[in-house]
Image (tube, grey):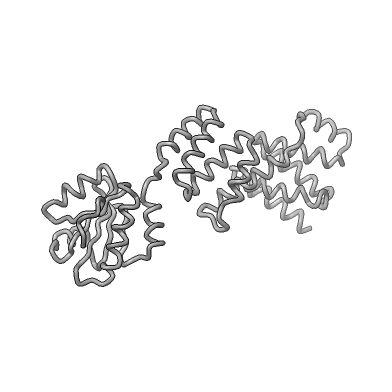
Amino acid sequence: MSNSVEFAYDVTEENFETRVMAASDNVPILVDFWAPWCGPCRALGPLLEKLAAEFGGRFLLARVNADDNPGLVQQFGVRGIPSVKVVVERRLVDEFTGALPESQLREFLQQMLPSPAAELIESARVTRTAGDLKRAAGLLSEAMALDPANEAIQLDLAETLLDADILDEAAHILESLPIFPKDPQRVDQLKARLALLQNAPPQTDAASLEARIEMHPDDLQARLELALLHANDGRYEPAFQNLLEIVRRDRTFGDEVARKTLVNMFNVADDDGLVRRYRMELAGMLNR
């Protein structure tokens, strides 16, 4: 195997402490245990070298000839080759055995390595906490340009845009996600929240809506607007109560808008006990 790749090199028992353990304080090290007689090693090795060069120093590849370094084989518990161990800050943090195809290798590396946009992500978090939502969204957009396949960045950006009431851009991000996202629960929550914000009533106050309902208890539109107003203020219990009352009075109102809105709110509300209670109430009402 070649020694000429900039980010890949051979190591032995004699220099392992320096070239792997000490080096792992600064960058993740992939340790590839191989042997000259191993056919799968000849397939995996060049792929790892190619990716090490492509990733440009985000990880280093340390090659260990298992035949010549039995002490390292024993130290790392290698039972079959090729065997790849990941060392970060002098600790074994991940591993795999066998010659993975390139697509799986890339997925393994993406999960293992810190995002190239890590500093931007942290800056966005701090900026968002300070209340500057538009600046945080800008930082996350820059991060997404650096790491476009990172779903977590996309979801952070969509959530920040929702917080800033920039709904069209948030919708575009959520619509562009894969059919099977890595974090479907968070995606569902953000889509549900987007739907609530898109259907938010015109600017009005709760007192006016409550007065309309008191004068006309069957004013279901007022009940719906009041529920959405409460939900957008994070007050889910009164929102649930008003929507259930719409279902009780006329479940078909607005093409079952109350039931559909309740389901969306159940995905958004963060009080599991409250959600369970009102899910049961809705189910009981619908099954009468």
Q: Is residue 235 left or right of residue 210?
A: left
x, y (%) of residue 71?
14, 60
Q: Residue furthest front?
A: 4
Q: Residue furthest left?
A: 14
Relative depth, front residue between 85 and 137: 137
Residue shown at 14% from the left, 56% from the top: 12
x, y (%) of residue 101?
37, 65
Residue shown at 25% from the left, 56% from the top: 31
Q: Is residue 273 left or right of residue 209?
A: left
x, y (%) of residue 112?
36, 51
Relative depth, front residue between 113 and 272: 113
Quadrant housing the C terminus: bottom right
Relative depth, front residue between 200 and 35: 35
Residue shown at 55% from the left, 55% from the top: 178
Quadrant housing the N terminus: bottom left
Quarter assignment of residue 283: bottom right
Residue 19 vertical position relative to residue 68 in the rendered view, above or below: above
x, y (%) of residue 77?
22, 62
Relative depth, front residue between 65 and 94: 65
Q: Is residue 103 left or right of residue 179?
A: left
Residue 78 vertical position relative to residue 243 in the rendered view, above or below: below
Residue shown at 76% from the left, 59% from the top: 287
Labels in figure, total? 0
Q: Is residue 174 left or right of residue 9?
A: right
